[in-house]
Amino acid sequence: VSIFQKTYLKDRAYSIKCKRERKKISKKLYIIEESANFFRIDYFSVLLEKLALEARKYGVHLILIAQQLEHIPKRILKVIDTRIFLIKPDKKNEFIKDIELTFEPSTEVLQSLNNTKNTNFVYGIAKEFLI
């Protein structure tokens, strides 16, 4: 069992205890830099998928940082509510195509992405918007 998994299990147990005692759950933020390196290892890939699926209800929030969209498995991208993309202006059209293939956004979102001059995108499932 990794230190990362032990930390998550401890945080989850604490959140469950707080819920039982009707106390407010403290929020935790896990930031995974160069996450593509972790997805190459099956053990971590399974663990990160589990976190993406269940961690929010335990007050744990996950930030995955990767160089390219395809470095994060689609099964995980599909369950993350908010995605922030920082891209170079010359890569905008290529990146919009990646977003279209990965997330199947609405026509309205694609039009907004194409019309924006800003290349920092926030894309969410519940609310689709740009910054």
Image (tube, helix red, strand yellow):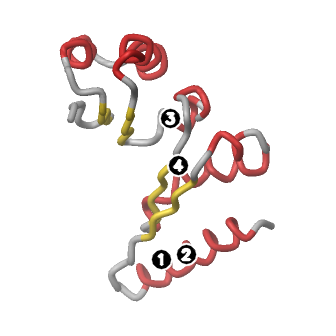
Q: Quadrant of residue 25?
A: bottom left
CB contact under 8 Å: marks 1 and 2: yes
Q: Could you say whether the residue bearing mark 3 is in a helix, strand or loop?
A: helix
Q: How many marks?
A: 4
Task: Look at 55% across and 34% down and name the residue there.
Answer: 67
Q: Which mark is residue 53?
A: 4
Residue at 31% of width from left, 33% of height from top?
123
Separation (CA) of disc 1 from disc 2? 6 Å
Give the residue displayed 37% in from the left and 42% down from the top: 81
User: Contact, CB < 8 Å: mark 1 with mark 3?
Assistant: no
Mark toward the start of the polypeptide (1 vs 3): 1
Q: Amino acid at mark 2?
A: Asp
Q: Which mark is residue 77?
A: 3
Binning the other alpha carbons within 10 Å of mark 4 as few (below 14), some (14 to 19) or many (20 upward) gives some
Secondary structure of the residue carrying tag 1 is: helix
Q: Residues within 10 Å of mark 2 (few under 14, many from 20)?
A: many
Q: Position of residue 114 (x, y in %)?
A: 25, 13
Q: Disc 2 and disc 4: Cα gap in Å?
A: 15 Å
The residue at which mark 1 appears reads as 15
Tell me the kind of residue under disc 3.
Answer: Leu
Q: Pointer 3 and pointer 4: residues touching (CB < 8 Å)? A: no
Residue 100 in percent (x, y) is at: 41, 15
User: Marks 1 and 3, how far apart in space?
Assistant: 25 Å
The residue wearing badge 2 is: 11
Q: In the picture, which quadrant includes the C terminus?
A: top left
